[in-house]
Amino acid sequence: MTMIKRGFAALAAGALSTALAMPAFAEPVKFDFWFGLSGDLARVVDTLCKNFNASQTDYEVVCTSQGNYDATLQNTIAAFRAGKQPAVVQVYDVGTATMMLSGAYKPADKLMEENGYKIDYADYFPGIARYYATSKGEMLSFPFNSSTALLYWNKDAFAKIGKTEAPKTWEDVGADLKAMKDAGYECPMAINISANESWQLMEQFSAIHNQPIATKNNGYDGLDARLEVNKTKFVQYVTDLKKWYDAGLIKIKSKDLGQDMVQAFASGTCQVIMTSVGDHGTVGKTHKEGMNWDVAELPVYAGTERKNSLVGGASLWVLSGKSDAEYKGAAAFLNFIHDPKTALFWSTNTGYIPVTKSGFDYMKSSGFYDKAPYKGRETAIASLTASEPTEITRGVRLGNFTQIRAEFGTQMQAIFANKVSVQEGLDTLVKNGDAILDRFQQTYPGKTLP
Amino acid sequence: MEKRVTFSSWTIGILFAVPQLLLIFTFFYWPAGQAVYWSLTLQQPWGGGNIWVGLDNFRSILSNADYWNSITASLVFAGISTGLAMFIALVLAALTDRQLAGSRLYRVVLIWPYGIAAPALALAFRFILAPEAGFLSAINRMWPGIWDPGLDGADAMASIIVAFSWKYVGYNFIFFLAAFQAIPRSLIEAAAMDGSGVIRRFWDIQFPLITPTIFFLLVINITESFQDSFGIVDIMTSGGPANATNLMVYKIYSDGFKGLDYSGAAAQSIILMLLIIVLTIFQFRFIERRVHYG
């Protein structure tokens, strides 16, 4: 009885306090943010959202993970067709062309201007801004989580063959791998050849060597761009990779086979890998006790003038058809993410790099890159800013690029299984990729990329 | 005059059928109709518009070598996994029906695999069949490189066939056991008294009497192997290596949802539907003749 009475009293007190508290705050405007990260990264995004909600009282962002990038885009499309789209959505790099033609967005630069936020677009690293900007340089979306590919190398293994530095050229890589094999290492280098590795193997390689992936400046200048990776330096690269694979210098590691590249490197099984700077934290946390390792820029072929590598990751799009109040909230949210302090929080808790110079400077000045677990990540910035982006190293803007990446995986697997020669495989990749681009162009008759 | 409450047989019939018809219409005919419409147009994924292209989608799919490869892979998968799942289930059910020691336990345990969701089971098999870390890694240690589903298409196909069959053995087992137990004991006992052995009794008495069940399971297994294979392929191979396990249903998913080519995927699903219809008609037309319904 007393329990019940006490319960009622508590309820009444609660109701009273809520009632008293109510007039003090107007109900904040809620808006949705959908993103494609999961696991640890999703928890960081949730914290980011909480920080935003705590930083002001006018808006409340509701952040929902959709599991992965593909699902985020699919679910957003389904929601948009039903008129229930979120205000802000995270879309991965290769979805940019699809988004630009969708007619379903509100340009991010206009949104910020309308709501009175001054964003200095020159502050973005050019390599990052140009990937997402239109051909005229307008920012339709805001770069969010960004990374680039690096070479991870095991210092102990290199010390065994008398090297103290990471290889700078592919010629050196070939010699070093051979030396490590001779020194008794079972797996000098690990790669994987699924659709996902199109990023480091084909896209990053082509950018650094200033080689086109497709005509029309990689698609920036028109939907009639077609692939041309079967006649660039990339052919030589695949030929070498295959040669090293046949000689046992390179092993294929994937989750399906029991161990992915990053695990193979962290466990000391394999001595060299190429993967995103985003894995820097994972290797740091999971590497074998006492293992010495570092990261370096991806190698180039001797005599190549190195260009900037490509940014990978995703950007934030604001979708059309929402209320003005929601747009105000979205603008405030984007402004919050743009803040250098948020950049520090974001990069500390994930492996991603800051996207603005001011964010990078702020992190440098706060000593972020001097501390042990984060040391080395500045290599990613060096790689991204190795040169002013050229017409070709801005990025890749091709329709249905996800399917082209899948085709890349298919053909690489055929090449490595000796079903076709390197040239045949890449010719088929171009042929099938062009069919995908053809279809994309037909789907959007009379439309042009902004 | 006799008084009788009568209803017009038409009205009442339709009244009873309406809820069912509505359900079928909403969840089957309407989406199927949409798929047909989409397959004849080019749909912009964001709903910005579409263009009528007639049979172009079908033409481009059917002239694509990858698609024919996908059909072949699906047929191979359907044939082998159906055969395997039915044969193993038949043997297990026949043994369980003989009341050998422990048959009560088997009766319960053998049904469980069917209760496991395809992705979970695929994940388990991915671990079991992993060439470097799984149970099969022992084979690779003896003969290096002999088992490599990551690059060898035949190995990858074998992996998904094993996973799928394992699941459907459980399903088939239930039906086979029920069919065996419906056979009157007296028939078998009489045959035993006449001196026929276990194998003879199986072929001359039990097998002919369960042909309706075999036929039913054949139709179901083949249909399911075209449709229920999705989860297994997605987790275990993602259609690779080099499209070796890119079954029709998986290709529909990857083209439609990952590639945002809704029209092409719609056309493929129409073709898949037609293929299953044709296969089922074929089975009813030619195989059912050999079935004896008691």
Image (cartoon, helix red, strand yellow):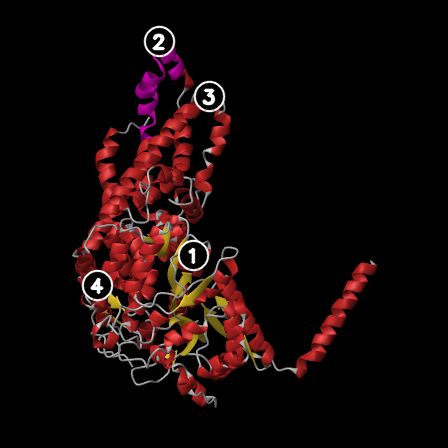
* Residue B282, image x, y percentages: 22, 40
**As drawn, A362 above or below A6:** below
Disc 1: host chain: A
Whether residue A83 appears in this view of the structure is no
The amino acid type of the residue labelled 2 equals Asp
Disc 3: host chain: B
- Given residues B290 and A34, the one toward you in this image is A34
Report, in whole angstroms, how far the alpha carbon at label 3 lies from the one at label 4. 65 Å
The amino acid type of the residue labelled 3 equals Gln
Residue at image mark 3: B99
Whether residue A243 appears in this view of the structure is yes
At mark 2, the secondary structure is loop
First reached walking from the N terminus: tag 3 or tag 2: 3
The label shown at residue A265 is 1
Would you say residue A223 sits in the magenta stretch? no
At mark 1, the secondary structure is helix
First reached walking from the N terminus: tag 4 or tag 1: 4
**Residues rendered magenta in the picture:** B187-212
* Residue B7, image x, y percentages: 40, 47
* Rendering quarter of residue A391: bottom left
At mark 4, the secondary structure is helix
Identify the main secondary structure in magenta: helix
Answer left or right for A332 relative to B157. right
**As drawn, A261 above or below B181:** below
Residue at image mark 2: B194
Residue at image mark 4: A235
